[in-house]
Image: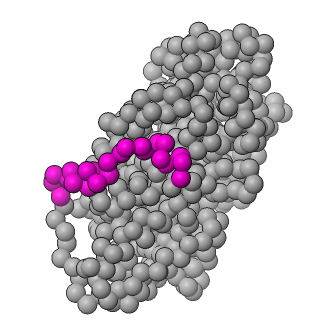
Amino acid sequence: MKPQKNARLSRRDFLRLSAGAAAATLLASHNLEGAFAQESTPIPTPTPIPGLSGEIVLWGWKGGIEHFQAAIPEFQKLYPNVTVRIEEMSYEDTHTNVLAAINTGVGVPDATNFDVNHLGEFAEGLMDLTEKLQPYLHEFIPVSVKLATYKGKILGVPQDSQPVGMFYRSDLFEQYGLDAEQITTYADLVQAGKQVAEASKGEVKMLAMDVGSKICMGDPHLIIDLLLVQNGLGGTYFNREDDKVVVDTPEAIEAMEVLKQLSDPDICFLGMSDDAAIAAYGADKILATVAPAWFPLAMTGNLPQLSGKWRMMRLPAIKPGGLRASYQIPSVTAIPKDAPNPDAAWEFLRIAQVSLEGQLRFTEATGGVMPTWKRAVETLVEKPIEYFGGQKIYALYAAIAEEVPDVWFGRGWPEARSIMRKHTETVIRREKSPEEACKAAAEEMRLKLNKG
């Protein structure tokens, strides 16, 4: 999910667009003021901690820090002797600097945002927030808390929720005689793609991805990651104990077999840049895409002319009756163990993110990115979204989020993803079989990450 230069577009890039036309399109007429008023069973506000003073420094990138800035006035009403300084840096620099700070103890911030796939490598330097979050856990979507947990300790405050569905062009489905309700497995999707290819003489495809299974317009989300989770590998590459690599298990090989079928050049445009994908979507050449919960902003921001033509469905299952839900990589906010002012940092996070008001500010600041507070999500689920033909897509995303099984991110996950991407390319290019690629990826991960 890191932002890329030039044509590459990530979730972070689209968050930066959220204050503009994309946000206006997606959340038009959404009454956030009314939403603030509907907390019918408020959590009692803890007694302010006397004597807090000094400064709080929080790190993050544009698109994930605006709700913190908006919370400062409320915080300073309770703690006038504490100043808040939010240091904006690039996505890449945030993660690099966090790792350096917690490893050296130099220049440690009081709180920081990071994408949760870095949790394993940051874990030893983060404060255990389990006890502090305990009174609020029932308010969060369960999978969001699980993702912020490493070896039994909650190490981050959940920020956004990223369940995954599939978007499809309802007009093109009708044109090619397809019924979304009949596509319940990936085999069904492949068969539908072949039907489209035959009818269009290969001019139109069901899907598009790059040669490493990246979702077009979603760098670097990999479709293989979603398939691994769907097939029972909640840690994607690692086991729950985070001491073994699992990408050469039968479940992983089966997921890679599905990826091979989806990357058939008869049904999928391969090697597409983001710009090429946007052009192909706009020219009615692609019928569907897998879609994390931030992806509506990608569509409204880049393809406004297709408003009303898209719909959302669940992901197909790998096997009949199998799981039709998966999850991508959200962000969390953590307090380092060596934070200079940890009590003040927690109080600030409690107000800015561990509350209905705070999470609604986040949704408003990002133009509709799905929050993690259940009652904040409830303010969105009944809203029909015009871009999706009036469909209540947040209701479907919320249902998917409730169905996602345990998911977790272990130490070295970002490096493991790079390794997996490289070996996935050999399957897409038909250079190796799924089994060969999975075994080669596992061997490289074990060697480089020192896991069994």
Q: Quadrant of residue 211?
A: top right
The residue shown at (52%, 60%) is 63
For the point 62% across and 15% down, which residue is it?
A: 192
Q: Quadrant of residue 358?
A: bottom left
**Who is closer to the viewer here, 332 or 360?**
360
Give 340 or 287, whichever is nearer the viewer: 287
- Above or below, 149 against 396 in this view is below
**Which of 43 and 443 lies nearest the eye of the viewer?**
43
Residue furthest out toward the right: 431
In the image, residue 367 sits, relative to residue 335, either above or below, namely above
Note whether residue 237 is visible: yes
Image height of 114 relative to 38, above or below: below
Q: What's the coloring here?
A: one colour
Total marks shown come to 0
Residue 341 on image: x %, y %: 39, 84
Residue 112 position within the rendered picture, expressed as x and y whole percent measured from the top left: 49, 71
Q: Nearer the viewer, residue 331 or 78?
A: 78
Residue drawn at 63 percent across, 67 percent down:
90
Image spot of residue 316 (x, y percent): 53, 25
Is residue 37 shown in magenta?
yes
Is residue 140 in sight in this rendering? Answer: no
In magenta, the rendered stretch is 20-42
> How far across and how far down the image is residue 174, in percent?
56, 13
Residue at image x 27%, y 50%? 35
Compared with 116, 74 (above or below) is below
* Left or right: where 450 falls relative to 235: right
Horizontal side of 150 relative to 250 (left or right) equals: left
